Image (tube, helix red, strand yellow):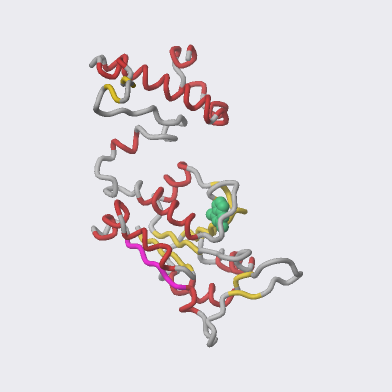
């Protein structure tokens, strides 16, 4: 997968050189490049923003540097890359969206700062990109960079080969619409707290039931909205009893 990130703070994205994503880049599974938007300005001050038409607080990112940057990363035109525009005004990013994006050949992330990017850039970009404004959730960040770190990690780990043991992708939070069950390791007794006995029993049927019940209990307590969305057909009789 090819990923381009355009930002006025390319150093923010240095974290993508670390850990699993960094390793995937070294191994050639992810071809990820970070571009400095200011390299696409033409004035002496490398200006990327200006005051908003209609007035109001803050500054708006100018269209010209964005057009040049997007031209430079769009590719040869026989593909239609996905242009992800992180914004608190976007559709909420989910695990389902991460799975969809993991199927794409080319993702471009356009990190806005200030009050956002001139809207005409997104309209114009629609000619060559599949443009998707995306939000991490209902709170405000100062810019898209931190959101891109989260999205690249969530998508990148779903690209085949990036996570060494693909089974670890199956049993995780949100993969079945439920939160993950609690986990424990040695020692079996720690500060007077015991690991739930069933986990030491070796009875795999009982262990699976315990974990499933914990998933349901936890999801009901922390995320009742997810319980509402569960498909009734995905619940067995014992689930309903929990
Ligand atoms: Cl994707 N961007 C910004 N600037 N703020 C956010 C966000 C994104 N998601 C939640 N808040």
Whether residue 155 is visible here, answered yes or no, is yes
**Residue 65, image x and y in percent?**
54, 76
In the image, 96 versus 13, the foreground residue is 13
139 left or right, relative to 40? right
Whether residue 134 is visible here, answered yes or no, is no
Q: Is residue 217 above or below residue 238?
A: below
Q: Is residue 32 magenta?
A: yes
Q: Is residue 216 above or below residue 118?
A: above
User: Magenta segment range?
Assistant: 31-36
Residue 187, located in which quarter of the rendered image?
top left
Ligand 1 - quadrant of the structure image: bottom right
Identity of the residue furthest to the front in this view: 191
Q: Main secondary structure of the magenta part?
A: strand
In the image, 190 versus 221, the foreground residue is 190
**Residue 216, image x and y in percent?**
46, 23
The residue sitting at 25% across, 18% down in the picture is 200
The residue sitting at 62% across, 54% down in the picture is 89
How many labels were placed on the picture?
0
**Residue 15, image x and y in percent?**
36, 59
The residue sitting at 31% across, 28% down in the picture is 184
Q: Quadrant of the N terminus?
A: bottom left
Identity of the residue furthest to the bottom in this view: 44
Residue 167, located in which quarter of the rendered image?
top left
In the image, 118 versus 197, the foreground residue is 197
107 left or right, relative to 123? left
**Residue 112, image x and y in percent?**
55, 64
Q: Is residue 81 magenta?
A: no
């Amino acid at each position: 997968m090819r990923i381009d990130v355009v930002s006025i703070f390319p150093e923010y994205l240095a974290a993508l050189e670390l850990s699993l994503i960094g390793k995937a880049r070294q191994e050639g599974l992810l071809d990820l490049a970070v571009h400095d938007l200011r390299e696409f300005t033409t004035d002496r001050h490398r200006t990327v923003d200006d005051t908003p038409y209609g007035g109001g607080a803050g500054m708006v990112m100018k269209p010209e540097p964005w057009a040049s940057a997007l031209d430079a990363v769009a590719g040869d035109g026989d593909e239609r890359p996905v242009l992800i525009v992180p914004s608190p005004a976007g559709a909420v990013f989910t695990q389902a969206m991460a799975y969809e994006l993991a199927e794409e050949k080319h993702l471009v992330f356009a990190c806005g700062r200030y009050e956002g990017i001139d809207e005409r850039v997104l309209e114009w970009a629609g000619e060559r990109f599949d443009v998707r404004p995306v939000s991490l959730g209902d709170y405000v960040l100062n810019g898209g960079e931190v959101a891109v770190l989260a999205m690249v990690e969530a998508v990148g780990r779903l690209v085949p080969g990036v996570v060494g043991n693909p089974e670890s992708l199956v049993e995780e939070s949100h993969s079945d619409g439920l939160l993950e069950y609690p986990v424990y390791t040695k020692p079996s007794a720690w500060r007077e707290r015991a690991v739930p006995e069933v986990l030491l029993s070796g009875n795999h049927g009982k262990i699976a039931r315990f974990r499933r019940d914990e998933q349901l209990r936890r999801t009901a307590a922390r995320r009742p909205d997810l319980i509402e969305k569960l498909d009734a057909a995905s619940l067995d009789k014992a689930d309903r009893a929990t």
